[in-house]
Amino acid sequence: MKERIQKLLQEYSISSTYLADKIGVQRSSISHLLSGRNKPGFDFIQKLLKNYPEINPTWLILGKGPMYQSENQPTLPFSETEERSTPREADIRSEPNTNYHIRSSQKGISKKNKMIEKIVIFYSDHSFDEYHPNEE
């Protein structure tokens, strides 16, 4: 994991001192990690991922996959106070949100005989909810 932390420092062009201050750990703990003296604990990993939510946890912990989260890869929020819940119609705002982009994977294909299977809502904390209109 030492190499991945070094890569993170290089990618963000930050010092180990800055990283320690930003995530709220002792500066010496970063130094010990980078020297190979210590291995990071759960608290360190959690603080790092809270402050850099775009980092792929699988890459950071296991060294597998890309460094950054992809758009299609759902992530779990790290907030201790948040509870995941299923979407309800009452939770959906009545006012339309015009700050969105619609992407279609089937451009130019007829929309006849198509039914909505699911709607996925992505939140800024990298969590998401799914709505299945045909399963009521």
Image (cartoon, rainbow, N blue to C red):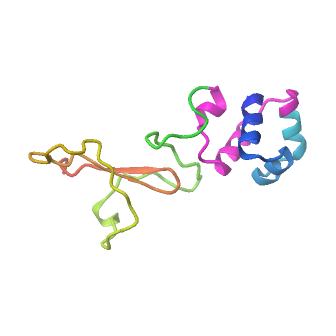
What residue do we see at 88% from left, 34% from top?
Answer: 32
**Quadrant in the picture for the N terminus:** top right
Residue 88 belongs to the span the image colors magenta: no
- Identity of the residue furthest to the bottom in this view: 95
Residue 39 belongs to the span the image colors magenta: yes
Label count reads 0
**Left or right of 13 in this view: 95:** left
Classify 97 as above or below 76: below
Classify 94 as above or below 100: below
What residue do we see at 82% from left, 51% from top?
Answer: 18
The answer to which image quadrant residue 108 occupies is top left
User: Magenta region's main secondary structure?
Assistant: helix
**Left or right of 89 in this view: 24:** right
Q: Is residue 41 visible?
A: no
**Left or right of 39 in this view: 111:** left
**Left or right of 111 in this view: 40:** right
What residue do we see at 43% from left, 41% from top?
Answer: 72
The answer to which image quadrant residue 45 occupies is top right
In the foreground, 89 or 17 = 17
Q: Pinpoint residue 135: horizontal percent, then vertical percent.
A: 19, 47
Query: Bounds of the magenta span?
Result: 34-63
Q: Pinpoint residue 40: horizontal percent, then vertical percent.
A: 77, 34
Q: Pinpoint residue 38: horizontal percent, then vertical percent.
A: 84, 30
